[in-house]
Image (tube, rainbow, N blue to C red):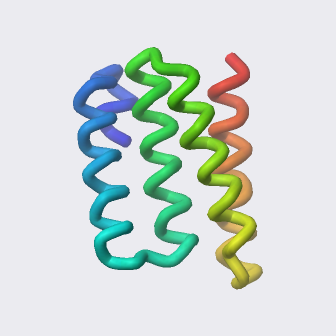
Amino acid sequence: MCHAVTGQGREAVSHAQACLAVCEANAADAYERFFAFEALAHAHAAADQPRAAKQARDRMAECLQQVDDADSRAYAEPCLAKVDEMLAQ
């Protein structure tokens, strides 16, 4: 996320993909994968890859649907909304 914020898109994508790979290798739950896809969405946006950013956003939404804990969903929903705002710009 730090690389994305500073406009280092290529580095951001690399780190976000590594984060997602760790989640997948360790059978992370939907809540953890949600945030990996959030990082990936921000990274692709920073790398000027809007289609890939939208795909990561859509994967966030899929993961959110699988989160059963109400408190976790309540925390994650605004994160998805912020990504939506970012992609709308």
User: Measured from the top left, where is residue 59 in percent x and y?
Assistant: 60, 51
In this picture, residue 55 sits left or right of residue 48: right
- Image: 9 above or below 68: above
Given residues 79 and 50, the one toward you in this image is 50
The residue at the point 44 percent across, 46 percent down is 39
The image quarter in which residue 13 lies: top left
User: Measured from the top left, where is residue 52 in percent x and y?
Assistant: 51, 30
Which quarter of the rendered picture does the N terminus lie within?
A: top left
User: Measured from the top left, where is residue 79 in percent x and y?
Assistant: 64, 51
The furthest residue to the bottom: 69
Given residues 4 and 13, the one toward you in this image is 13
The image quarter in which residue 14 lies: top left
In this picture, residue 45 sits left or right of residue 20: right
Number of numbered tags placed on the structure image: 0
Given residues 50 and 88, the one toward you in this image is 50
The residue at the point 30 percent across, 71 percent down is 25
The residue at the point 47 percent across, 20 percent down is 49
Which quarter of the rendered picture does the C terminus lie within?
A: top right
- Image: 6 above or below 72: above
User: Measured from the top left, where is residue 19 in percent x and y?
Assistant: 31, 56
